[in-house]
């Protein structure tokens, strides 16, 4: 592509008019004749034995078609729910998980029975009539206690509660001794609920005569669901069609398959009726996988001159009662513990702990927000001890040469960390802010300035690294480009767009590569019956860097064939034919040219080159040579009302670098959403369980606090562009960046604001009651505090 | 939303509504804006056998001043109260409070009668009603605010009793309501109201107990000449709030003092 006209263009998302005017079609918008509705009877307890299930009353209730329990599903489903190795190849145990409980329930919300009825109201009413006799068992809720030898067990027949314990790099005491200043921190990453606007949902229809199953569901990775579900039900992939239509948000929680993804198709097969289940909001908070849920013990050391020496992170990861399919993905936090800096030594260990809670799994950022948080907090704590400006400590230690191989063997492809930080500081007016802060403190006004220089591994990923991590399937990406006789183009991709704007950006790439009008290109995704044999889905900020490249590659294959045809038509040698902005011509005579569309038409005619088949279409699988490594610096400015503990977020500056840009507006949109989500972790969201009973206390949006646009200032965005050398488009991912960077920018700012009180640590969410208590305790406990109060 | 089954009837007059309520008995509920009742039904925490919809009753959303009293009809929506020139002129604090209830959707639907009858501890109007000695007029009687809020979600209303209007004294002197919350559309964690009236101060608190609280100790201290800061220290006198996910009892008491001080100082 010598010239680009669409790549880099700031055009509106073409999917938006449809989506924002209510014309989108989500799972619940689909229906099949004779559909029955499924309601799930769930365990009210975190841990109990199921003594008996009496379905008599429910079976007799109006409209009820069937009631199924474990023994019914065991007839049509086999095996256990999948768990991939991810970043921990060897687990101590993987508790076997069948989609519905048989004898023991291990988290609140675990399915125990399902009711099928003619209406959803009847299904729900009847589900209340099922009488389950439970014998409650002690619930394991706390990570520390779970690891004690005398702890009750999450699964009564399990060996203990340890899921894994892996030291990636052990301590190097000799190096660690070189540090002249050492800090320690214990950082809590609270459990978060992914809360997409559209909850989960499944509609399944089984055709007995031909043995085909069609499943409509809200998924980020329909092909993986087909792979796994086909295995569980014994249906080959050519008879199992999974359709993930418009999806109202995924955030990582719609990658892995769920119990209901098995139970609904199984119920369709058992009952012979199409079956629909739509998750309620409370079910979603209770049973959709949670994100984060980790505790880090962090230690870091530096020389007095600010040279970083070591950082050591121990991750305790709350797995929940079963392992999510990608439970150990979040262990990647360990591999990125060193962040954007040169350390002499990085030590890391991950410990996976089972608890009687819903499983954790990836959630926007998945391991990388946690890594950024621990590293950027350590940097600020060290800066505090060294009495250095945190920006200067960063500047002194940034990695500056690329490619850079980190302590874990990961290769950072490109970066310019200082440049991004300087731009962010420029937008913020950093020096001036520091002065304002100093002046303010004299008047009892507590400003805080927090910085986060983030890096990210994304674009999963090269086959050599990802096939072992999934247990076999390499996370490459596929695309098919089909050019029809009259020149319009359909592109089928294995990624899935649910907010990322692929309908816009992928055609932008195709438009430039083929040189055809953007409007002549249609993008299709989400239906396993269309396009290439396998697709890999959208997560881990991979769609552009891997899927976009597959689209580019398939487009180029099409151009290659078209060039052969054009050469034949020109009676010229192939290498003498130039292709520029949609036109072929023989080099030297550009006025005698043939449009791409003319060649497309010719490709379906007679007189093609010797041995060439008709048609103009191509499939490509793209296997990247490396991950891609976006980066940037964010700065948050807060003011803390020390009397109430309220944090007022005054400004938020984000400078991000994701390499070359296909559509700046979409990049900005991704950053906005991501930043809001990270801020939300820092200030609002938290899943809370009762420590004793294991009951969730945040089962509605009244208690689980998701902020609205009211709670945010206008974000101030900046951008540097450092192309990725990893792929031809020079692109990196941007879907998770905002979330990865922002929670710690806020926490560093809050800690900075509270530093006159001697407060060095604030747990998330930094809620007013929590902050008030910290200030209150600090004032009660120190003279320093008294001074600050004046 | 999948509530339990219920019957539904729409009344076109107070008499008809009352008759319907009598007919369905104990388990019937009035449906006004639905913004407290329906969330409870969604979770099946409320499973009324029947709903008597009063939204079709004409003239129950009046807002008028007469005889130095402000009459606000039970069906007056928050948005109407917020924007009403009559309220702004005669009891501006009520318009301000209305503008701080929930979000746009809640303000477009929720009614003052519903807030009173529901008697949520975090309801905002009850604080104003209590501290100003408002009266709740029903189809059967008139109840003083101090006798109305018995306990959390508990009022003396009989099953077939319908709130017709709330009658406030006119008060347009310095006033302020400070509602402390996490998000703009949240309920109050704690709220504090200050209203200058007849030469003295009225001070009310939201969500520091099962019912709204009138901070008489603060009122008295101010009357005796204490500075706002000193007087506000009495805001937590006698309070025994229960803790919840957002605030410990101790923190609520602290907020009561801080917010009371600010409300008095910022009253204008
Ligand atoms: C997201 C959200 C945020 C909110 N935030 C706030 C807030 O910050 N502050 C606040 O004060 N409120 C808040 N609310 C509640 C809101 O103000 C409700 O509208 C109000 O509590 C109930 O009024 P309603 O008209 O909706 O009553 P409904 O929900 O229809 O009824 C509530 C109860 O009152 C009874 N009832 C209603 N009208 C009458 C009547 N005329 N006579 C007798 N009984 C009657 C009903 O039977 C029912 O028991 C919030 C609600 C939501 C959903």
Image (spheres, rainbow, N blue to C red):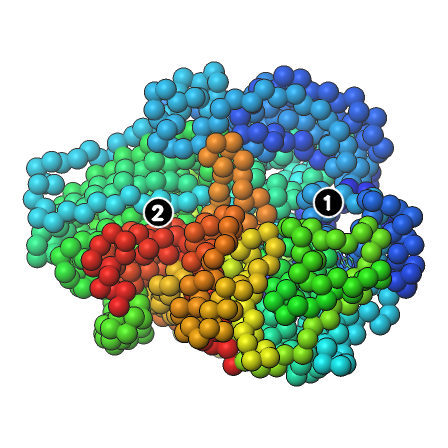
- Depth check: give the residue in front, A150 or A626: A150
Residue B107 location, quadrant: bottom right
Are the residues flagged by discs 1 and 2 from a single subunit?
no
Does residue B95 appear left or right of residue A317 in this picture?
right
Residue at the (67%, 81%) spot, across then down: B90
**Crowd class of label 2 (few under 14; some 14 to 19; many from 20; radius 10 Å):** many
**Crowd class of label 1 (few under 14; some 14 to 19; many from 20; radius 10 Å):** some
Does residue A118 appear left or right of residue A164 in this picture?
right
Residue A113: x %, y % from top left = 68, 27
- Depth check: give the residue in front, B38 or A551: B38
Does residue B226 appear left or right of residue B44 in this picture?
left
Label 1: element kind: loop
Q: Is residue A380 above or below residue A256?
A: below
Tell me, yes or no, if residue A732 can be seen here.
no
Judging from the image, mark 1 belongs to the subunit labelled: B
Mark 1, ligand 1, within 8 Å: the answer is yes
Q: Is residue A531 above or below residue A357?
A: below
Q: Circle 1 is placed at which residue position? A: B46
- Depth check: give the residue in front, A565 or A153: A153
Tell us which disc is closer to us: 1 or 2. Answer: 1
Q: Is residue B184 above or below residue A232?
A: below
Residue A145: x %, y % from top left = 37, 28
Q: Circle 2 is placed at which residue position? A: A370
Residue at the (85%, 53%) spot, across then down: B160
- The number of callouts visible is 2
Judging from the image, mark 2 belongs to the subunit labelled: A
Residue at the (40%, 33%) spot, across then down: A142
Say which mark, if any, is on residue A498.
Answer: none
Q: CA distance from mark 1 to mark 2?
A: 41 Å
Label 2: element kind: helix
């Amino acid at each position: 592509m010598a010239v680009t006209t669409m790549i880099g263009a700031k055009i509106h998302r073409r999917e938006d008019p449809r989506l924002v005017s209510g014309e989108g079609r989500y799972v619940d918008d689909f229906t099949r004749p004779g559909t029955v509705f499924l309601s799930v009877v769930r365990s009210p307890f975190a841990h109990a034995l199921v003594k008996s299930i009496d379905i008599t009353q429910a079976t007799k209730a109006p409209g009820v078609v069937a009631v199924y329990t474990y023994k019914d599903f065991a007839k049509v489903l086999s095996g256990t729910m999948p768990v991939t190795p991810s970043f921990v190849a060897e687990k101590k145990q993987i508790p076997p998980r069948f989609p519905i409980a048989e004898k023991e329930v291990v988290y609140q919300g675990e399915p125990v029975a399902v009711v099928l009825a003619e209406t959803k109201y009847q299904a729900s009413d009847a589900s209340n009539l099922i009488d389950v006799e439970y014998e409650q068992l002690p619930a394991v809720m706390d990570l520390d206690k779970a690891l004690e030898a005398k702890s009750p067990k999450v699964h009564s027949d399990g060996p203990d509660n340890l899921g894994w314990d892996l030291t990636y790099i052990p301590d190097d005491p000799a190096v660690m001794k070189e540090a002249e200043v050492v800090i320690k921190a214990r950082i809590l990453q609270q459990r978060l609920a992914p809360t997409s606007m559209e909850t989960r949902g499944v509609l399944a229809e089984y055709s007995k005569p031909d043995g085909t199953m069609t499943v409509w569901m809200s998924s980020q990775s329909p092909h993986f669901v087909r792979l796994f579900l086909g295995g569980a039900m014994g249906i080959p992939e050519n008879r199992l069609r999974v359709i993930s239509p418009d999806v109202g948000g995924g955030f990582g929680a719609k990658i892995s398959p769920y119990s209901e993804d098995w139970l609904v198709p199984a119920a369709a097969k058992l009952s012979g009726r199409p079956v629909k289940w739509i998750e309620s909001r409370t079910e979603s908070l209770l049973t959709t996988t949670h994100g984060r849920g980790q505790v880090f013990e962090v230690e870091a050391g530096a020389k007095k001159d600010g040279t970083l020496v070591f950082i050591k992170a121990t991750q305790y990861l709350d797995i929940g009662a079963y392992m999510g399919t990608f439970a150990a993905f979040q262990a990647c936090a360990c591999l990125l513990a060193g962040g954007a800096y040169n350390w002499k030594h990085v030590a890391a260990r991950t410990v996976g702990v089972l608890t009687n809670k819903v499983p954790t799994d990836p959630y926007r950022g998945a391991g990388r927000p946690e890594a950024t948080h621990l590293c950027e907090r350590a940097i600020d704590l060290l800066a505090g001890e060294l009495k250095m400006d945190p920006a200067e400590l960063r500047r002194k230690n940034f990695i500056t040469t690329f490619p850079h191989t980190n302590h874990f063997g990961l290769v950072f492809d490109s970066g310019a960390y200082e440049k991004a930080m300087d731009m962010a500081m420029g937008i913020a007016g950093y020096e001036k802010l520091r002065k304002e802060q100093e002046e303010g403190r004299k008047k009892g006004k507590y400003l805080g300035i927090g910085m986060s220089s983030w890096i990210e591994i994304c674009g999963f990923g090269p086959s050599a690294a990802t096939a072992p991590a999934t247990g076999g399937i390499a996370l490459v990406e596929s695309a098919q480009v089909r050019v029809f006789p009259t020149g319009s183009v359909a592109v089928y991709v294995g990624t899935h767009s649910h907010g990322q704007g692929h309908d816009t950006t992928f055609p932008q790439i195709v438009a430039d590569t083929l040189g055809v009008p953007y409007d002549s290109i249609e993008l299709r995704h989400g239906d396993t019956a269309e396009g290439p044999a396998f697709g890999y889905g959208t997560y881990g900020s991979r769609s552009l860097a891997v899927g976009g490249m597959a689209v580019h590659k398939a487009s180029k294959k099409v151009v290659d064939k078209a060039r052969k045809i054009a050469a034949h038509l020109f009676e010229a040698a192939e290498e003498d034919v130039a292709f520029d902005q949609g036109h072929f011509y023989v080099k030297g005579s550009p006025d005698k040219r043939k449009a791409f569309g003319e060649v497309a038409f010719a490709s379906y005619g007679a007189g093609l080159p010797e041995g060439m088949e008709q048609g103009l279409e191509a499939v490509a699988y793209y296997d990247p040579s490396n991950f891609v490594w976006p980066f940037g610096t964010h700065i948050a400015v807060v003011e803390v009302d020390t009397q109430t503990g309220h944090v007022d977020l005054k400004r938020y500056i984000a400078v991000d670098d994701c390499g070359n840009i296909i559509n700046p507006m979409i990049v900005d949109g991704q950053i906005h959403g991501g930043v809001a989500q990270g801020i939300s972790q820092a200030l609002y969201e938290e899943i809370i369980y009762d420590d004793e009973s294991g009951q969730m206390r945040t089962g509605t949006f009244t208690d689980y606090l998701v902020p609205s646009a009211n709670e945010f200032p206008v974000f101030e965005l900046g951008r540097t562009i450092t192309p990725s050398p990893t792929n031809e488009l020079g692109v990196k991912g941007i879907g998770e960046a905002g979330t990865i960077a922002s929670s710690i920018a806020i926490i560093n700012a809050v800690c900075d604001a509270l530093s006159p009180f001697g407060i060095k640590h604030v747990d998330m969410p930094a809620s007013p009651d929590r902050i008030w208590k910290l200030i209150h305790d600090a004032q009660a406990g120190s003279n320093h505090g008294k001074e600050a109060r004046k | 939303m999948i509530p339990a089954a219920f019957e539904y009837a729409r009344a076109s007059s107070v008499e008809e509504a009352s008759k319907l309520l009598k007919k369905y008995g104990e388990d019937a509920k009035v449906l006004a804006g639905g913004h407290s009742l329906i969330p409870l039904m969604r979770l099946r925490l409320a499973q009324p056998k029947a709903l008597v919809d009063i939204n079709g009753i004409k003239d129950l959303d009046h807002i008028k001043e007469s005889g130095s009293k402000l009459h606000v009809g039970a069906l007056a929506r928050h948005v109407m109260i917020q924007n009403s020139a009559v309220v702004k002129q005669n009891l501006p604090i009520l318009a301000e409070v209305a503008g701080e209830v929930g979000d746009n959707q809640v303000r477009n639907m929720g009614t003052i009668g519903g807030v009173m009858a529901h008697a949520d501890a975090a309801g905002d109007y009850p604080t104003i009603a209590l501290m100003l000695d408002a009266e709740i007029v029903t189809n059967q009687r008139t109840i003083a605010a101090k006798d109305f809020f018995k306990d959390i979600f508990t009022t003396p209303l009989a099953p077939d009793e319908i709130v017709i209007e709330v009658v406030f004294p006119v008060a347009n002197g310095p006033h302020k309501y400070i509602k402390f919350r996490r998000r703009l559309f949240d309920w109050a964690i704690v709220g504090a109201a200050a209203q200058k009236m007849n030469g003295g101060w009225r001070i009310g608190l939201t969500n520091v107990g099962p019912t709204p609280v009138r901070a008489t100790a603060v009122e008295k201290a101010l009357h005796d000449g204490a500075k706002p800061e000193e007087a506000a220290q009495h805001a937590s006198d006698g309070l025994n709030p229960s803790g919840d996910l957002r605030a410990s009892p101790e923190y609520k008491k602290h907020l009561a003092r801080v917010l009371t001080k600010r409300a008095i100082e910022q009253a204008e």
